[in-house]
Amino acid sequence: MKQTDKFTLSREEEALDEIKRTQIKRSEAQAAITLFLFFLIIVPAVQLLVSIPAFEMPRKVQGKGIDYVWEYNKQLIDQKEHWESSLEEQSFLQKFFPVPFQRFLTQVLHTGNEKAIVGKEDWLFYETDIRYYQTPINFNSVACIIDFANQLEKRGIKLLLMPVPLKPTYHPAMLSGRYPAGKRLQHPDYARWKAELQSAGISFATLPDTITYLREDTHWDAASMEKAADYLANDIRSYATVETGTTNYTLENEKICQRGDIYSMLRLKALLPWGAPQTVEIHPVLNERGEGCLPSRESPVLLLGDSFSNIYSLQGLGWGSGAGLAEQLAFRLQMPIDAIRRNDAGSIATRKILQNELKRGRDRLNGKQVVIWEFAERELSFGEWEKLDMTLGTPEPSTFIALDSGDSLTVQGTILERSASPMPDKVTYADHVIALHLTDLRHTSGDSIPGEAVVYTMGMKNRELTPEAFLRAGDHIRITLKSWQDNETQYGGFNRNELDDIELQLQEPVWGENIKRID
């Protein structure tokens, strides 16, 4: 073959050509085949001895003839997928091998994985944050933000935009020796993006000149967050003419020693030998009765925020509670703040929650003077920038169960539909909520209960799937239902997989716990 001819071959043709010319001794080939067969047999054999989930055949199937066959086959496929997922989760390889392998990569090779990047002096960085600076900003976000601001303006509400810079912005020297100390990074498209919005009249929240981030976490430290709350309170007073309230909030002191969310992405499950957990001082906000500061829907200020708002506020993030951005803002304004927060997808998640409430006829914007929209800058490249209609709907009669604050109800029911379970090694945050659609509701005594229920419950805790994550459509369960209003502060900030049916997303949910499958 001529050298010039080789460049005309595809990669597959080149590989086949190399294979044809590969020489291997017979003894080496036999050894390789033997080793391959050994591992091919030993892995399932060990898995069978250690743990293998039982395969459940489809339960009672409705219909006759071809409808029966169709429905039975559908349920059989669902059961097969459930069994395969269970097998993967219970795999001894999945449980035992990733940890020592990742420890070797981190300790010996000083590298992370597809999510966590190891920097200098034990600093850790989120891979998506780094990739943001190499990915063009989606300028569809400009039209989306302007549209949202215009809808608010029609109701006399002002929008204050708060994109939060990412960790590499202020700490590039901890990521690479190419950057001197004090160097600051900025996305090459950011200045033009901001200028287009400002020219359209969009106002930006003032941020501190320097933000310090947690060593092993994606988020800012408590002192920087509180400094941002100082600036934000001043912006609100001057921009929206919101006056300081009369609630007597006070601050407490608390120290938290913790590992960060990027460290958890390494899934080492043990302390790194060269670094200790970081200690931060947070300041939980208390009212005059010594109780934690809670959001109020009556507030003239609404915060739409992601995990940068939840950090120090949501206990599940590991850095304490009651001391986050909303609470610090409430302390500085001496009034309760209304807040819709979700750990991820700051470009759309909180707006979607707001839109759903408005569609139900619940006017979350009533009495609001200013809406603060906080999101991480990475959303500009990777977020979902869809225009959402914020028109107030008309309340309609519903057959779905809604519980008042303090109410609790233990029932039996059938899962008609459920949202997808999270993949522990794929999602960013360690806790996750899933949704169930329950029908055929009955009291534990057997008496029928009219209506249906949309239920939120925990699907993953500390990157471990809960038993609820393995429930399937058709399962009969016993469950205790509680008011979502009573549980939204604790669980509403977690990432959540919703039901596919948009009409179900518009129903008032309840919180579910103590779930047991009924055979």
Image (cartoon, grey):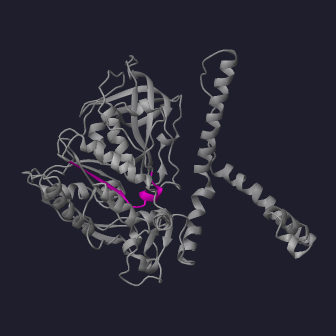
On the image, the x and y values in percent for residue 298 come to: 17, 41
On the image, the x and y values in percent for residue 276 come to: 39, 75
Q: Is residue 299 left or right of residue 58?
A: left
Q: Is residue 477 left or right of residue 336?
A: right
Query: Is residue 260 positioned above or below 482 on the image?
Result: below
Number of numbered markers? 0
Per the image, is 7 magenta?
Answer: no
For the record, the magenta segment spans 370-383
Residue for point 6% across, 51% down: 246
Q: Residue furthest left?
A: 246
Query: Is residue 397 positioned above or below 125 on the image?
Result: above
Query: Is residue 80 positioned above or below 308 on the image?
Result: above
Quarter of the figure with the N terminus: bottom right
One can see residue 285 in this view: yes
Q: Is residue 441 left or right of residue 407?
A: right
Q: Residue furthest top?
A: 64
One can see residue 267 in this view: no
Per the image, is 374 magenta?
Answer: yes
On the image, the x and y values in percent for residue 39 come to: 75, 60
* Location of residue 271 (image quadrant): bottom left
On the image, the x and y values in percent for residue 503 come to: 42, 29
Q: Is residue 104 left or right of residue 373?
A: right
Q: Residue furthest front?
A: 199
Residue for point 57% across, 77% down: 109
Residue for point 16% across, 61% down: 234
- Give 331 or 76, whichever is nearer the viewer: 331
* Location of residue 256 (image quadrant): bottom left
